Amino acid sequence: MGSRKFTENLFKVLMLLSLVLILSTLVGIMAVIVVKGWNAMSLSMLIETPQGGYYLGQGGGVANAIVGSLYLAFGASILAMLISLPAAFALQREYTNRRFADATRFVLDILWGTPSIVYGAFGFTLMVYLGLRASLLGGIIVLTMLMLPIMIRSMEEVIRMVPPELKEIAYALGTTRLETTFAVVFRQALPGMITAVLLAFGRGIGDAASILFTAGYTDEIPSSLLDPVASLPLAVFFQVGTPIPEVQERAYAAALILLAIVLLVNIASRLLGRRFSKNIIR
């Protein structure tokens, strides 16, 4: 009895230590970014484009990178969602046999674990082959490829969590597979799907390696899909490596803006998930 009690208490302590470690990591990241970047934060950082060329000057702001990151992440999220939603439903046993679905999940897991720089190199090779230059469109396509495995696997797991009894009741009432999918499964899985989309959005807006070769770089806000586009991750990458302290401070300020966007996306994910969870039958 004493040994079992000791083991239980030991695992409680280990779990608490794990939680403290995770929270400390987040607090540590936020503290470093805020302390190093707060002095450079100003209204001009948010609404002005950089002065001095490719962020290496000490004036202006990162408005082009903020808008560019939102263009890239929103465009890729919409494109990935249009592909992921039917793909996630197609992996269910009603539409695909188990062996093919397992093989597809295995491929998606490999793609999920593939480093983003590999996506960037692949996208760059494809663009060279097609004769395209670095642009907003190229960045969106590569980010979509990066988001797809995340979104499909997350949506698929959410769909699999829908109680099978609900589908059996719907079939017993005479509905077809398609009607059950849209009227029962989709409605039940909607909060989780929203979370999956926003998580992929957060992953895409913060990625630098995949768009390093495909999105290009500019001090201007793009006016078409074929224009090069700046982004916050690349602004941080270029600025933090300079030996100029003022430029480094601006890099941390750009990182602070990026962190704030990711936090807002996660808060929105929570609120939307709670909003639509009212329709779920438990």
Image: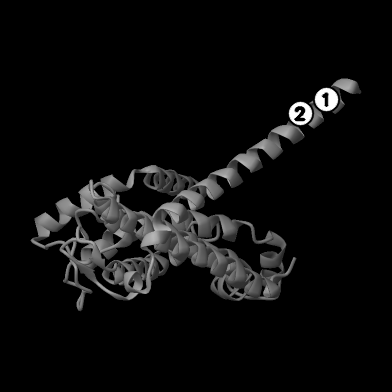
Placement of the C terminus among the 4 image quadrants: bottom right
Any part of residue 274 in sight: yes
Q: Which residue type does callout 1 highlight?
A: Phe
The residues bearing labels 2 and 1 have C-alpha atoms spaced at a distance of 6 Å
* Residue annotated with mark 2: 10
Give the left or right position of residue 225, taking residue 149 as reference. left
Q: Nearer the viewer, residue 100 or 244?
A: 244
Q: Residues within 10 Å of mark 2 (few under 14, many from 20)?
A: few
Give the left or right position of residue 22, taking residue 50 as reference. right
Eyeballing the image, is 209 above or below 78? above
* Residue 21: image tag: none
Q: Which residue type does callout 2 highlight?
A: Leu
> CB of mark 2 within 8 Å of CB of mark 1?
yes
* Residue annotated with mark 1: 6
Mark 2 lies on a secondary structure that is: helix
Q: Nearer the viewer, residue 253 or 85?
A: 253
